[in-house]
Amino acid sequence: MTRSFTITVFTEDQTGLLSRVVGIFNRRNLNISSLTTSASSDETIHRFTIVVNVTEEMVIKLVAQLDKQVDVLKAFYYEDKDIVYQEIALYKVPIEVFSNGNEVEMMIRRHNARVLLIEPGYVVIEKTGHEYETEALLTELRKVGIYEFVRSGRVAIVKPMERLNNYLQELREEVGN
């Protein structure tokens, strides 16, 4: 049975690594639901956060394949219950939607969103949350009018202590012996 898994891949920051990582998913004909790259807590290590809907058997194979890449330090996978995660969404709406009473204002409050920018022709609204939360606001804003919508990939922190730090410590201890 397929379900959502978040894969974190810790790497050296090397040119071309993104295409190699994505290539692993392409070769298996798998869709990536979300992909975010960033620095990690260690300034020498880069982090990929990848969300896929696959079986657990498949995610185990993916992580093993990622671990084999030369510049990959370590890859891990998590179920949603094992991580804290968010996405950010931006919505550009016509300024006119605010002239019909306080419907849009109440909508923004109900969804715990906030106004980022007010321009003569439009307003930019920001919402952070899970995908279903940002989609819910999008659905409501479509009813009143929307110019543009964009959502980031998932950013995630693991609930247990960061496994990479433990892994690196084990490597240091092995080298020291």
Image (cartoon, grey):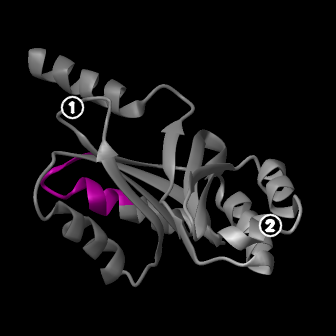
Q: Residue at x 77, y 64 (%)?
A: 98
Instruction: Using the rendered view, name the quadrant where residue 134 is placed.
Output: bottom right
Magenta residues (range): 63-74
Residue 15 part of the magenta segment:
no
Instruction: Give 99 or 50, whichever is nearer the viewer.
Output: 99
Q: Which mark is residue 43?
A: 1
Question: Where does the image place residue 6, in percent across and percent down from the top left?
Answer: 50, 55
Residue type marked 1? Glu
* Residue 95 place in picture, x, y as percent: 67, 68
Q: Secondary structure at mark 1?
A: loop
Q: Quadrant of the N terminus?
A: bottom right
Residue 70 is a magenta residue: yes
Left or right relative to 151: residue 22: left
Q: Are marks 1 and 2 in contact (CB under 8 Å)?
A: no
Give residue 99's mark: 2
> What amino acid is labelled 2 in the image?
Ser
Please rate how many residues cluster around mark 2, counting C-alpha atoms within 10 Å: few if below 14, some from 14 to 19, many from 20. few
